[in-house]
Image (spheres, rainbow, N blue to C red):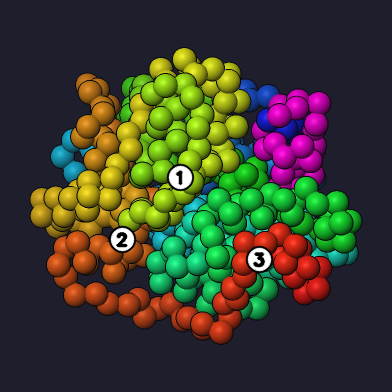
Amino acid sequence: MNYHSTRDIQQTATTRKAVEHGLAMDGGLFVPEKIELLPSSFWNNLQDMTYPEIAWTVMHPFFCEGLSHSSFQRIIDRVCTIPIPLSEYEDRTIVELFHGPTMAFKDIGATWMAALLGEYQQEADQDLHVLVATSGDTGGAVAAAFYQIEGIRVTILYPQNRVSLFQEQQMAGLGGNIRAIAVDGTFDDCQSLVKTAFQDQDLRRCLRMTSANSINIARWIPQCLPYIEAIRQSRIHQEPCTFVVPCGNLGNLSAGLLAQALGLPVSNWVASSNANDCFVRYLQNGIWSPKPTVHTLASAMDVGLPNNMERIHYLNGSTWNHSKDRIKGLSVSDKEIASTILQVFQQYGLKIDPHTATAWYALDKVVHHVGARPMIMGTAHSSKFDETIHSILGLPHYKAAEIKYAANKRKTMMNDFAWFKEMLLSEP
């Protein structure tokens, strides 16, 4: 399959080139040249299939190019070791996407990408540099997925003092081929530094670079798998359902829309955001007006300019009417996040992380749907935000002992591309 830029359909790339370049040269995101419905037999027989069989069928058209049967199977085997259980609470189901190595939904896409690039790298004669900007969870997922993969070096940029200690531990505690850098700025600043690096011709000539953000198709496309697996497990695959998705950079939601384009039966989408609400405002008035990022309790969603909006336009035909008809949105304040965490704990004895709390709250306020049970995409384990959650619940705080943190492995830098470029060239 070939891919083209969201900004210019004439800018095309093979699967491998799209994965290894990360971003199109015009700054656009790669999307498939065509998306074909999976056959009705696939959906009719979904409950008789295993998760690895589903993953093979769905992912093969997108990523089979240049890979042997055994190589592709190794990727499938590695990704499908991450379980995706469902938990039910009265009128709703939580799709638990936090059972990977870093307890966040991004482990699925990061693991796929690392396994895929590991296969590609076996034929390469030069190291590959993976650059990633993160508001918290992406960095840890990428660090864990790529750790000790031969021939690949990873540089993670994250906003200083705007991630949890647990998240910083996961990014900065490994060392080796993983370099974590705290930037004096916001996630959007980190993202801008990475995107500028890919458009810099000097860096392109000197280094083999790719991105591990959801701008990369190898991170983005596999995130459609949990939606299909959730339908299989729920036994409601013949009835359209509602998905409620916490939204930051819009990678998870746009992956769900990709699954729908493949035939996933969905009646409603609900996008929950924190105070960084440019997508919610767009759904309400059709005006795309990003604002500077503000820090919230749901810090992994602190994104002022979501990159994957370009993919949502692609999947929705670039029309506001189509987007607002398919997706309902709600912005959730820190006060509402905290009250939801407290309410859920008091009612069910369940700790939910701040991001999942936005979805829980949005479901109560937005959805008026009779039929299949609504599904909340639970994006992170509560323990990643233990200090915040225990403060809300009035419980003592404890630190996760299984994560080893080495503060001296963390670097800091100003929000300055010239400095970043010099560092990449001088410390390859």
- Amino acid type indicated by mark 2: Ser
Quarter location, residue 110: bottom right
Circle nearer the N terminus (1, 2): 1
Which of 70 and 339 lies nearest the eye of the viewer? Answer: 339
Local packing at callout 2 (Cα closer than 10 Å; few below 14, some 14-19, many 20+) is many
Left of 78 or right of it: where is 343?
left
Q: Mark 3: which amino acid?
A: Thr
Few, some or many C-alpha atoms within 10 Å of disc 3 (few <14, some 14-19, many ≥20)? many
Q: Which residue is mark 3?
A: 155
State the image coordinates of residue 196 (x, y, percent, origin top left): 72, 51
Looking at the image, which residue is at 56% across and 38% down? 308
384 within the magenta span: no
Secondary structure found at label 1: loop
In percent of width and height, residue 170 lies at 49, 70
Residue 102, percent across and down? Answer: 46, 64
Q: Give the residue number, with chain letter if any, for mark 1.
A: 248
Q: Earlier in the sequence, mark 1 or mark 3?
A: 3
Vertical arrangement, residue 247 with respect to residue 259, above or below: below
SS label for mark 2: helix
Residue under the point 62% across and 23% down:
36
Q: Residue at x 59, y 73 (%)?
A: 412
Kind of residue at disc 1? Gly
Residue at disc 3, secondary structure: strand
Work out whether residue 171 can be spotted.
yes
Q: Residue furthest left?
A: 347
The residue range painted magenta reads: 7-33
Identity of the residue drawn at 40% across and 38% down: 277
Badge 1: residue crowd in 10 Å (few <14, some 14–19, many ≥20): many
Disc 2: which residue: 382
